Amino acid sequence: MWGTAQRLAANRQVDHLVILTACYFHDIVSLAKNHPDRSRSSVMAAQKTQSILHSSFADFPVDRYPAVLHAIEAHSFSAAIPPLSEEAKIVQDADRLESLGAIGLARVSRSPGR
């Protein structure tokens, strides 16, 4: 997803550290599609990311936490949290493009005669 996000962020005035961090941690909590808390998985991922950044990445700039956490929360379609920053929009778009790519590949592999 980071590669897709990099292409979307190219030549834009955005915080690449925020995007990179959100890309790598966005699915750190991933609940099954039928799990009752599925719509909260991105919020849970943001909470876990904050804990990991705090405990394991002491040099990570604390002032960027809110932007990273928002991008993680807003990336999920099921959470219905609108992306409010350019960084969050890029992370959301990259995640959705990656998902479409996976779906497209699955459709091709299931097509008869291929």
Image (cartoon, rainbow, N blue to C red):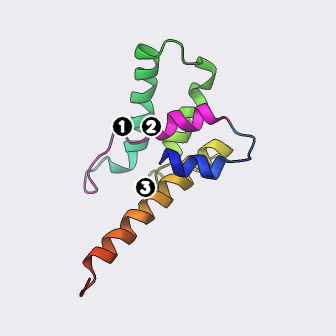
Which residue is at 37% across, 68% downward? 103
Which residue is at 56% across, 55% downward? 93
Write down the residue under mark 3: 78
In this image, 90 relative to 25: left or right? right
- Spatial separation of the CA atoms under disc 3 and disc 2: 19 Å
What percent of the width, then of the height, locates residue 10?
68, 48
| Number of residue marks | 3
- Spatial separation of the CA atoms under disc 1 and disc 2: 8 Å
What quarter of the picture does the C terminus occupy? bottom left
- Dot 3 amino acid type: Ser
Write down the residue under mark 2: 24
Classify mark 1: residues with Cα within 10 Å, few (<14), some (14-19) or many (20+).
some
Write down the residue under mark 1: 28
In this image, 90 relative to 73: left or right? right
If you read the primary sequence from the N terminus, does the residue marked by circle 3 or circle 2 appear first?
2
In this image, 8 relative to 78: left or right? right
Which residue is at 56% across, 25% downward? 65
In this rendering, the answer to whether 17 lies above or below 77 is: above
- Dot 1 amino acid type: Ile
Q: Nearer the viewer, residue 7 or 54?
A: 7
In this rendering, the answer to whether 98 lies above or below 41 is: below
